[in-house]
Image (tube, rainbow, N blue to C red):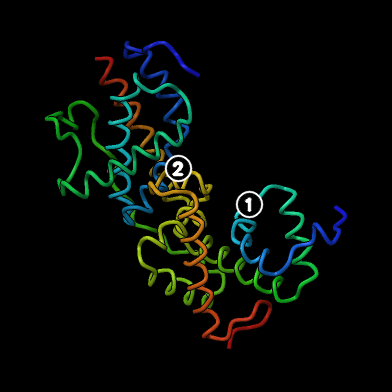
Amino acid sequence: MTEARRSSPDERAAAFDSYVVPHLEVMYRVALSLTREPPDAEDLVQDAVLRAYRAIDRFDGRYPRAWLLTIVRNTHYNRMRRRTPFLFRDGESAEAALGSLGDHEPSAESVVVDPQLEAVVAEALNALPEKFRAPVDLVDIHGLTYQETADALGIPIGTVMSRLHRARRRIRTQLDTVGFVPGKEMA
Amino acid sequence: MVLTRRTRLRCHQVARSLQAYLDGEVVPRRADQIAAHLEECRQCGLDAETYRIIKATIATSSAPDTDAREAVVRLRGFVERLASADND
């Protein structure tokens, strides 16, 4: 769908409602996977939202999710490169323009299903190099498709598949070493 | 689906597509073929079950969704403030 140029604030707000607001959750999940820290993830999404807002007039309306995940990824890499702490680098006043943000809540305790199995899997997952862990995070925890994961990480879909495969095989190897067999109690 | 010799998969073919199958990323016909193989082949069936458990354990042991929901609510507020600042 290609639309005429939007220029008024109302039109921008309407476009944002259509293209961005429905995807805030997946943007946050991707950001969480990239930053690993909820407060950093929220900051990253805010930064990405600002960039999307500035670019919304140029967005043609096709594949908003892929467009937004690409913005999140690029924003993350820019932030990493610049190491500047936060938003509004162009001299905007966040407080004046946008109001203050809520406090960040600490993470609640995880829901424990099988503590022993969970511990082995968590250890194996954490031991994975970042490039293998990120696709697992996005697919298994955040429920992204392979294509969305590829968009979010900026890698081809075949690379997503091979990294997922290798990551899970490593986790499985860890389970093998502790004698895990499906359907049997772990020793 | 009736599987003939031509449509039956071998273990190495299933192993190649197993992760995509578990992630719901294969076309329905291929999924049927893989499912049929997993029913018949004990070793591949055990492999699939192990990976299913790994996936489920990773998914359920991650941070509860309430954190994400609260973050998304705050982000919606951020968007609203952004739009209203643009209108001023």
How many callouts does the rendering have? 2
Please give left or right for residue B88 compared with residue A31 in the image. Answer: left
- Residue A32 lies, with reference to residue B73, above or below; the image says below
Q: Position of residue B22 (x, y in %)?
A: 63, 58
Q: Position of residue A185 (x, y in %)?
A: 63, 83
Q: Residue at left 39%, top 35%? A: A68
Residue named by callout 1 = B24
Q: Amino acid at mark 1?
A: Gly
Q: Position of residue A106 (x, y in %)?
A: 34, 56
- Residue A91 lies, with reference to residue A166, above or below; the image says above
Q: Characterize the local packing of mark 2: few (<14), some (14-19) or many (20 or more) Cα atoms within 10 angstroms.
A: many
Secondary structure under the numbered disc 1 in the rendered image: loop
- Residue B68 lies, with reference to residue A121, above or below; the image says above
**Label 2 vs label 1, nearer the camera:** 1
- Disc 1: which chain? B
Q: Distance of mark 2 from mark 1, alpha carbons?
A: 18 Å
Q: Characterize the local packing of mark 1: few (<14), some (14-19) or many (20 or more) Cα atoms within 10 angstroms.
A: few
The residue closer to the viewer here, A183 or B41, is B41
The residue closer to the viewer here, A181 or B34, is B34
If the image is split into quadrants, where does the C terminus of chain A sit? bottom right
- Residue A21 lies, with reference to residue A156, above or below; the image says above
Q: Residue at left 33%, top 44%? A: A73
Secondary structure under the numbered disc 2 in the rendered image: helix
Give the residue furthest to the front: B6
Residue named by callout 2 = A26
Q: Amino acid at mark 2?
A: Val
